[in-house]
Image (tube, rainbow, N blue to C red):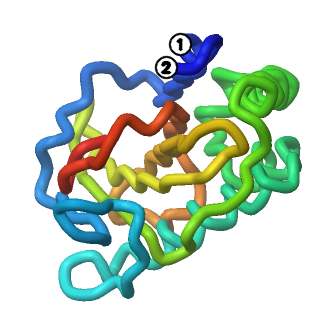
Amino acid sequence: MLPGIRFLVLFLIVGLSGCDISGTISARSGTLDDDYVEEPLSGGVAEYETALVTSNNILTLISKSKYPDLYRIYFSDAMKAQMTSKEFKKFMIQVKEDVGPLRAYKSMQWNFSSGKDKGLDLLYSVKIAEHEKTMMKYIFVFEKDKPYINIVGFSVKQRQGISTPGQL
């Protein structure tokens, strides 16, 4: 683990803790040997296209250091109540300082899992991104069966090997 990365895990889910991630959806692109692969959405995950587009849009804003825009456009009201735009920007600047700028990501790489917490059905969209110093995983949490535009949770952590389907 890179120095400073230990504290990089930011997990904001409004009022949620100990989420059950063993829901009905657990699928990702790629093979058993490689999860950083692009492939079209199909079958049971085609309905999550908007979540994938939103996740990609967020990563594009991160790559351009447009943190206030990301916060304004994609954070749910409940998340905004937990963290200010200034706090979020400070966190993302720290991520950038620790692992370098976001260099690339594959727009058709995807990993979706569903879970439930405190009566909310959730969809987790996991994206892998290449930074200057390491690979990172971005986890975007949406309320399941909503428009998949506003996130109710967000996490970023260093990628540790290949994820199995459903593994965050």
- The residue depicted at 26 percent of the width and 48 percent of the height is 163
The residue pinned by badge 2 equals 1
- The residue depicted at 41 percent of the width and 62 percent of the height is 36
Give percent across and percent down for residue 110.
40, 66
Q: Is residue 111 above or below residue 139?
A: below
- Quadrant assignment, res 104: bottom right
Element type where label 1 sits in the image: helix
- Quarter of the C terminus within the rendering: top left
- The answer to whether residue 131 is left or right of residue 108 is right
Q: How crowded is mark 2: few (under 14 residues within 10 Å), some or many (20 or more)?
A: few
Amino acid identity at mark 2: Met
Q: In this view, does 57 lie above or below 73?
A: below
Give percent across and percent down for residue 153.
50, 38
Amino acid identity at mark 1: Arg
- The residue depicted at 19 percent of the width and 56 percent of the height is 165
Cα–Cα gap, marks 2 and 1: 8 Å
- The answer to whether residue 127 is left or right of residue 2 is left
Q: Residue 110 carries which label?
A: none
- Quadrant assignment, res 86: top right
Mark 2 in CB contact with mark 1 (< 8 angstroms): yes
Q: Is residue 155 above or below residue 16?
A: below
Give percent across and percent down for residue 1.
49, 20
The residue pinned by badge 1 equals 6
- The residue depicted at 49 percent of the width and 43 percent of the height is 137
- Disc with the residue nearer the chain's start (2 vs 1): 2
